Amino acid sequence: MSLKHGLLGFLDSNGSMTGYDLNKIFISMFGYIWPAQRSQIYHELKSMEKLGWVSSNIIFQTGKPNKKEYTITEEGIAELKKWLIEYNIYDQLRVKSVFLMKVFFSGKNEIKENINIIQSFKNECMNLLETLKVGDEAISYFSEMGFTENTIYPEAVNDFEEDYLKMCIKWADKTIKKLEKMWQIIENSFLNYAKFGTVKNFTDMKIFLY
């Protein structure tokens, strides 16, 4: 997904908006699936204006700072439509996750440490799931954000986020269970070998096992 195209989508759906309003709605709608800093959004708006995708207008205000409103142009609408019909299956299914890469190499860590890390990941997913708006609450929220004509597509994205978070929680439980089982095997082996003086501590046990 392109940050530029996401901003074009909001300008097309909601009409003219300031950078502040775009930042607010972008974080509200896409904060989980596409985190973006305010500085990035303002940078992209300047770039889009140079490309001719948006135009800007200064709104003069009395007693408070002036504000700049952005409006999507015909060129911007054409670019948005072009982007919406582009489809690359590899791009859609690709998952770029530093966390999963770290998990892959986590055999270098202590098992208990890995359990704690994955438990923290699970807790964060549960927190996000609790804040996710679902059902009628989600429909009402999308309407408030300007999607009054058709909320089925924002709902579809919301459903994906909900199902994805539930999948992550399920994966975390499954992985923690496997690690706890491994830890139990090592602990029992240590106790058994310790009876005969083969190992004296867990460090020796790791050397003995590996």
Image (cartoon, rainbow, N blue to C red):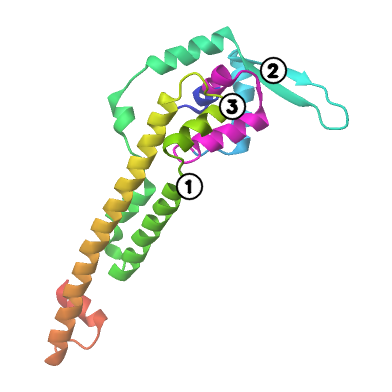
* The one of 77 and 16 positioned closer to us in this rendering: 16
- Quarter residue 202 falls in: bottom left
Q: Is residue 98 above or below residue 45?
A: below
Disc assigned to residue 7: none
Q: Quadrant of residue 86?
A: top left
**Image depth: mark 1 or mark 2 in front:** 1
Q: In the displayed image of the protein, which residue is found farthest to the top? A: 74
Q: Secondary structure at mark 1?
A: helix
Residue drawn at (33%, 28%) of the image: 91
- Badge number at residue 56: 2
The disc at residue 131 is 1
- The kind of residue tagged 3 is Glu
Which element carries disc 2, helix, strand or loop? strand
* Residue 190 painted magenta: no
Q: Nearer the viewer, residue 159 or 194?
A: 159
Indicate which disc, 1 or 3, sits on the residue closer to the N terminus: 3
